[in-house]
Image: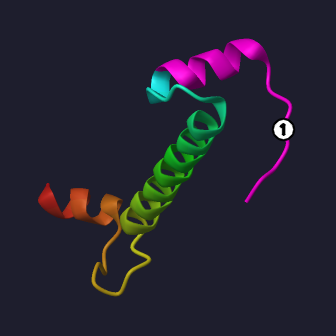
Amino acid sequence: MRITIDIDERTLDDAIRLTGETKKGPAIAKAAKEFVRRQMAREFGRMLMEGEFGDYPMTNEELENADR
């Protein structure tokens, strides 16, 4: 999907450097994909710690208290 965005030159240069890409489009796409991956992992970790899965009946706090 193609979109048009406004991004300052410094941020774009950083994205190109940090992603290792040589072109703007692939650098921004890679940075966005990595951002989404990290956010989803963070959300999954939060859900896991809060006991939102049936396989994990205790929250992180309950597990820590049980160890004491």
Tally the numbered discs. 1
The quarter of the rendered structure image containing the C terminus is bottom left
The residue that appears at 84% across and 38% down in the rendered structure is 5
**Which residue is the extreme one toward the front?**
23
- Density class for disc 1 (Cα within 10 Å; few <14, some 14-19, many ≥20) is few
Q: Nearer the viewer, residue 30 or 22?
A: 22
Question: Going by the image, does 28 lie left or right of 66?
Answer: right
Q: Amino acid at mark 1?
A: Ile
Q: What residue sits right under mark 1 in the picture?
A: 5
Residue 7 sits inside the magenta stretch: yes
**Which residue is the extreme one toward the left?**
67
The quarter of the rendered structure image containing the N terminus is bottom right
- The correct choice, above or below, for 47 with respect to 39 in the image is below
Res. 28 image quadrant: top right
The residue that appears at 35% across and 68% down in the rendered structure is 59
x and y percent of residue 66 in the render?
Answer: 18, 64
x and y percent of residue 50 in the render?
Answer: 43, 67
Q: Nearer the viewer, residue 58 or 42?
A: 42
The residue that appears at 53% across and 42% down in the rendered structure is 30
Res. 13 image quadrant: top right
Residue 15 sits inside the magenta stretch: yes
The residue that appears at 49% across and 29% down in the rendered structure is 21
User: What span is in magenta?
Assistant: 1-17
